Amino acid sequence: MEEKTISNSRRCYKQWLWFMVLFMSFSVIYVDAVWPMPQMISSSMARYTLNPREFIFQYSSGSSAQPGCSLLDSAFERYYPLIFTDYRHDEWFRFPFTVVVHVERAECEGYPDADSSESYKLSVCSGQAALRAETVWGALRGLESFSQLVYQDDFGEYFVNETEIEDFPRFQFRGILLDTSRHYLPLHAILKTLDAMSYNKFNVFHWHIVDDPSFPYQSSTFPDLSSKGAFHPLTHVYTQIDVKRVIAHARLRGIRVLAEFDSPGHTQSWGKGQPGLLTPCYKGTVPSGTFGPVNPANSSSYQFMTRLFKEVTSVFPDSYVHLGGDEVDFTCWKSNPDVRGFMLKMGFGTDYTKLESYYMENMVNITKGLNKTAIVWQDVFDYHEKLCCSSLSVVEVWKGGCYLCEVRRVTKAGLRVVLASPWYLDQPGPTHDWARYYTVWPLAFKGTEQQKTLVIGGEVCMWGEYVDATNLSPRLWPRASAAGERLWSDEKMTSSVIDAFPRLVDFRCRLLRRGIQAEPLFVGHCRHEYQGI
Amino acid sequence: MIATLKFTTLLLAVVVCRATQDYGYKDVEEPTLGDSQYGSLWPLPQKVQMSTVAFKLSGVSFQIVDAKESSSGASCSLLQNAYRRYDEYIFPISRMQGQNKKKAFASDVSELQVWITSADSECDNYPSVTSDESYELSVDSPVAVLKAPKVWGALRGLETFSQLVYEDEYGAKSINRTEIQDFPRFTHRGLLLDSSRHFLPIKVILANLEAMAWNKFNVFHWHIVDDPSFPYMSRTFPQLSQQGAYHPYTHVYTPSDVKMIIEFARLRGIRVVSEFDTPGHTQSWGKGQKDLLTPCYSGASPSGSFGPVNPILNTTYDFMAMFFKEVSTVFPDAYIHLGGDEVDFSCWKSNPDIQKFMAQQGFGTDYSKLESFYIQRLLDIVTTTNKGYMIWQEVIDNGVKLKADTLIHVWKGNQQQYQAEMARVTASGYQALLSTPWYLNRISYGQDWQAAYKADPQDFNGTDAQKKLVVGGEACLWGEYVDATNLTPRLWPRASAVGERLWSDKDVKDTNDAYSRLIQHRCRMVQRGIPAEPLFTGYCAHEYKGV
């Protein structure tokens, strides 16, 4: 509680305690509003009317962020219409309402990063709201929660109940992967997804930007990569301006943009604009005309990668970069006499996993030289485990089966983990199964406390084989919201699918109201249905 | 017809399957992609001869016009509207202004002449089950000619013509010399949308009627009411939607909405067959019509819940008579779908009045006899409105006596079972309509359009006479998990597979050829503004601009 900004705070504080008790004993119904569930929330029946014309956001006098903090100024602008979704101008005067925002450290022009604090405290009390956060990122999360506390009655009047929230994320890394290679996603589809991510408190946009089918990233160093490797060199590319726009849009919502340039496999499209990069496959003693993974035996491959990643790491400000490293097919390498010669020279025998490890190690060292932390898919760790190397730092677990066994292995090796296996949302599955993504317990493996802290979060993957702008949003939302709550909220408070269902139904209607094309969970209706086609 | 999981089952299922999933993103059987000799035609016409000789279509001077000999002219607004629509499809970017009207080049197609050959064009009629949809299209320079006995065939031919046009590498519109003779394999090519489980805004219904026309569907089966809500606003019984809709103003179809949908469909040669499903699936009816539903009993006292329509009260039949009299005037089509599926007998069994009635009638404890009793009386009522009827298969499974021209809608079972049912129904001399393999609300990972494509309604053991009784089929998109947010991409292009099966010759079944045409057809739908989802990795020149 901030004594300076909230008068009469003692009264609310008492109520707060009282409701904490009530909450713990009955799990009160008034806490339904916010998705994902805050770590601690209580509210009362006492409510305040909000008049859109008498509603302001304000910086507290002691806040280090003050007017001019572009990040919060624009957040206020954004949240006003999100709160007053159908503000009618004929509202007559009722009571003024102020949201006082206090931020300890104003990093208004910075980028969110792996160690950014997102915690906040929100107190709606005595006819106003006080939002306190250590960082602007926490303030953003708090604004989102506040906007979800506001509701309309049948006459269109806006209300917010007296509420106390103390909140912070369970996991620091809460990501969504979009695949812009298998299908090109127009910029507006990406920006819209970022909007929806912020409503769900996701904080990492994992941009799987290139892959076998196409190379839409327009590189300033190697423009041929997209001019030859994209589906179309003008209409199906992301220019530097597009990329900047995505990063800026994400930043304003407290979302990191994690770029993935997957190699040495999944690189067919690279080869079109960069001759000599891929391994020529052989049929007997002659080249077959097809190409395999990046050629790990050529030093020119590493020179190219160094220059490309130098560009990539300067374009994408995040301290992480994703190097891929999954699903490398060895048959082409095996067929190539130069690669075989290199294997011999390096003493790898016929173990091609050693060759891949060698390649990935070089890649990790390149990114280290650029002061970035590398993330790799689990395949790289699986090979490395045998070789016992320590250059890795973050491993993304994606394979099915006993994925927690893998999490256990990776954390035992002292490496950090991002978990994706249970959240492959591009699979529509046999049933319409948001609950499958909700009942995931990322820490339910045998391991030390230290191991558990190495699980830094999880990620929803929306691979693009069958997904483009026509069906992306309804396939992603609200199913990703289920993962969103798992990654943000306390597990004990959110273990019940039955309890979550009505909250998610309401939240899905809220997403619709905000223009997100979120599909229905079951039979029913929203007051305001989606109006597109 | 709605064999889907109930929510509680869903929750249980979820916990069970959690650990059993196995991923791998390359496990999909992908058809080989080549170029089809038929370009992007979908559904494939009965007879196509396409030459490699290409003509240009001038963006300035090309026109679609009535042929001089045509029995239809400027007063036929159905065709005039269609000309404008197809002109916009062919030239999606605004046409160049006409001041610079150059003469057509020799290699141009300057006109498409539309020639309605029979004396009565049927321009102002509603399409019906007997409407002639055949046409002949001859594309040559300088004129292309589309001949059709009726406007319905002309509509189908216009769609085909628009599908023949392509962009050459300089962006110029081109078309090859082509001869087409075409007619549908089946007369009933339907699509069911469910506006009760979720309300579907008018805009969504209209957009899908549009897409239906591109796929040569001709029946919109409007499953308009059901248990969850009653959005149909009845003039005779306005309280049905006032009490039974999700919301009495924002979630209803007013009489003028319904009229607009019927007219929009007519202009595209699509019939609107409404379904008012009884005696089951009627929970929402009970809210606005007291005493219509059967009060369920818990022991000796009413439990407060209600079951199917109460079949033992005269007031029930008085209500139905008035209600269906209205429905039969609102919906001009010659058929009404009466439902009749999934009647749960437990509530009837619990009710002492019904038990007494059963005894009186000598039904014993066979409640399907009671259902038959109800359906029989309902059919008599509907017969007085001069409408034909369609019913779900349970009605005939339960042995209800039906008029000879009744259409039986088969929806249950696996392949073996539905084929046996088709055989049984047609052996009894009834007309049959197949939906079982085309429940498109069911989704799976990968290219499931192929399964829909491979199913064939005449694929069962039976005589030629029996096969003739198969009038077609319907793709169904039930609404448990579908509303405006995901309906269109879930439906298209998967429903297109059904569209070709029902229109084209039965020997058109080369999946690779279909794949090549369907990919292009899907991109065409996207370009025309329908968010049809992708079949696999790849791209369209013009991606979807919505979201």
Image (cartoon, rainbow, N blue to C red):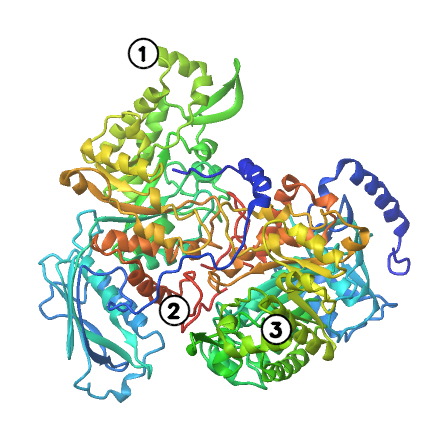
Identify the mark at residue A246; answer none if there is no mark: 3
Amino acid found under the numbered disc labelled 2: Gln
In depth, the one of A8 and B299 nearer the eye is B299
The subunit letter for the residue under badge 1 reads B
Q: What percent of the width, then of the height, locates residue A517?
A: 53, 58
**The C terminus of chain A is located in which quarter?**
bottom left
Q: What percent of the width, then of the height, locates residue B231?
A: 43, 43
**The N terminus of chain A is located in which quarter?**
bottom right
Q: Residue at x 64, y 63 (%)?
A: A383
Q: Residue at x 18, y 33 (%)?
A: B429
Q: In this view, does A219 lie above or below B37?
A: below
Q: Considering the numbered disc 1 on the image, is that residue within a helix, a strand or a loop?
A: loop
Residues at discs 2 and 3 both on one chain:
no
- Per the image, the residue denoted by label 2 is B527
The subunit letter for the residue under badge 2 reads B
Q: Considering the numbered disc 2 on the image, is that residue within a helix, a strand or a loop?
A: helix
Q: What percent of the width, then of the height, locates residue A380?
A: 64, 65
Q: Considering the numbered disc 3 on the image, is that residue within a helix, a strand or a loop?
A: helix
Amino acid found under the numbered disc labelled 1: Gly
Q: Is residue B232 above or below residue B318?
A: below
Tell me: A72 left or right of B224.
right
Within-10-Å neighbours for mark 1: few <14, some 14–19, many 20+: few
Q: Tell me if label 1 and label 2 are in contact, CB under 8 Å.
A: no
Q: Residue at x 59, y 45 (%)?
A: B19
Q: How far apart are marks 3 and 1 (CA)?
A: 74 Å
Q: Tell me if label 3 and label 1 are in contact, CB under 8 Å.
A: no
Q: Tell me if label 2 and label 3 are in contact, CB under 8 Å.
A: no
Tell me: B172 left or right of A497.
left
Q: Residue at x 31, y 46 (%)?
A: B474
- Per the image, the residue denoted by label 1 is B362
